[in-house]
Amino acid sequence: MNKRVVVTSTETYQAVANRLTTAWPKGSSEAKKGARIARRLLWVCRQANWVPETTATSHQAVTEFFDTNTPATFGVTPGTYAVYRSEVLSVLKPDPVRKRRYILQMDGVYREIHDRTVNSGMPEAFRWRCSPLLWYLRERVIDPPDITVDTLMEYYRFSLDVEQLAEERARRRAQDAAKYISLMASDPDFAEFGFSPVEITFPNRSIKYDVPRDISDALLNVFDSRVVPWARGEVSNQGESWAEYIARLDAAETPASTSDKKQAWKASQEYQDQMAKGEQLSRGPAKGFMPESRRWKPATIQSNRNLCATCAKVMYEAGKFHIETIEELTDPEIAEAIAKRLDARKPKDNPQSSYTSSILTLISTLAKDFVQRSPDDLEKIGKVKEKYGKKHEGIAPKNKETLKKFTDARIQTLIDMPDRITDEVNREVARRREIFRQEHGALPPPIEVFDQFLIKKVMFALAAKIMLTRAPRRSNLAGLRLAWIRWRDGHATIEIPPQFVKSRRQQDLPLIIPLDIKTSKLLDQYLKKLRHKMLHPDDDQNPYIFPSPPHAGKQRLGGFYDGLPDRLVDQVHDRVGVRINPHLWRHLLGWIWLKEDPDKLPAVQKLLGHKSIETTIKYYADIDETVILKKWMEYLDGKKT
């Protein structure tokens, strides 16, 4: 294309497409190429749910679209996807704003400021980084004394919208500009220009609330020191040991004559241990001690701790109210204020988020069992939960929509994924061995060409097969232990003890994950020949099937590959074309089977390890009414004459 279509920041996608189809003589090669790019531009709009007639073009938005999706998302080859990306972006990049424009071409006050910067003792980097700022100020006739934070925010938006810079780069540019101006404001050599110091800050994107960083510390200290020991069943809600708890309750009861023999029996450690392990104490969990079946596991403790931190931030942001105790957290009025604020902050793309419901459930639990609030307070909290809590049962609507993207073809791709990964590993091993043979004259043993990259792919294949077999929860998958493997006639079975499985008690059966013969052989080879290559030299006693690889974080020694579930769903995204989270994989298995046969609810209950059929029904009974409608249509078709 000799003549380029230059896009402005306010032009719509449809307008660009129209100009692409009319910019060159009809029938010319340029016109054909322009029409092709116009079709692809509108294809992007359809896939991204943009209205081409009203949506303004954005090089950054289109770049993010291609970066956050994969060829598998749209069922095209990587080559086709790359061509789409290249051609569409080629017509959205505007002409450079500073084309053939240099700082030495500038005149006036900002040229003088630049020259003085060069001759001053300022960091040399400012001389180059801030040239665009000086051009920006000069062209908008903004004098040095008039530069404010608003000026720099407009400069930031100019960098994004007009110059089409990446968001991170535009941020850095604005922050550098603020430092530059503040340095000049404090430097006597620039006093005559009248600069004032400015400070521009962008919210920390890892923090959702604009509050002091330590605002939740007081509440979390109480949570760690009082709530956590109680939730683990170590102490009562008042911090008492089991013996102290029993003695206090006995003292509160009506005195009765008790034999010395009975008193000695009740005081014995054996009696206390027996009672402490009871499923339901006669005095109940709401009276101080947490029974075994309801004790919080480590993941639950961490999750609830994060929810407490959120509550502290929400209340401080809403009205500078600083929650410092569990008693304040469980006040009905505070609970309602938190719920209102969270409801107002619900993401637009996920209005049915159950985050508020999770927080209210925690507050309700603490109010009832830990603080032991009055029935009137508990009733008020219950009404708040009913009003602002989760409005749906089972799988969230957003996740249901994700599951519906799994067509029959994508389901088959998912099922084939472990074998495809294994085949790729075998081909790469063969390629590396052949390269070695050509260089050294002999084929090396296959094990010698394995590096951490290939071993991780073997881990992905094994993890994918385990997830397809039983879909254990995230923590169970990453934390599988060598001691849980049982071998019989060449078949491996993984038995996860009940205390590591959600909602299971010590006396329940383990969660069984049987592996087929092919996967068992792969597991055996991995354990005998590959796993040790992933271990740190000082970590030979690591107990996990998937040990934390070197440089994988603070759990490297003696830890497990905590990021494995995330890397696994990345593989699903790349190969299947649908983005899921690790927990959604569990729902996916249930959905696949019920999609095939809606009568499989009892089987799905056993597959996913639900304790009751009610849990399975709650999650899957209404997952996709089209499944039932399809079966009904098949029935009607069978009755036609």
Image: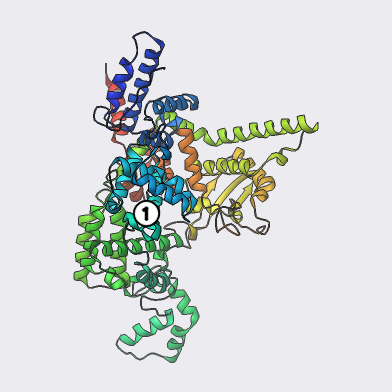
Residue 263 placement: quadrant: bottom left
Q: Residue at x 49, y 58 (%)?
A: 500
Q: Is residue 288 left or right of residue 554?
A: left
Q: Is residue 442 left or right of residue 501?
A: right
Where does residue 640 sit, x and y in percent of width and height? 27, 18
- The type of residue carrying mark 1 is Ile
User: Of residues 434 and 413, which is closer to you in this image?
Assistant: 434
Residue 560 vs residue 520, the one in the foreground: 560
User: Residue 438 appears in which quarter of the rendering?
Assistant: top right
Secondary structure under badge 1? helix
The residue most toward the right is 441
The residue indicated by pointer 1 is: 181
Q: Visible in this render: residue 187? A: no
Q: Is residue 439 above or below residue 546?
A: above
Residue 576: % across, % down: 46, 33
Q: What crowding class fits label 1: few (fewer than 14 Cα within 10 Å), some (14-19), or many (20 or more)?
A: many
Question: Does residue 539 appear anywhere in the picture?
Answer: yes
The residue shown at (72%, 31%) is 435
Residue 64: percent from the left, percent from the top?
39, 37
With respect to residue 528, does 406 lie above or below?
Answer: above
Image quarter in which the C terminus is found: top left
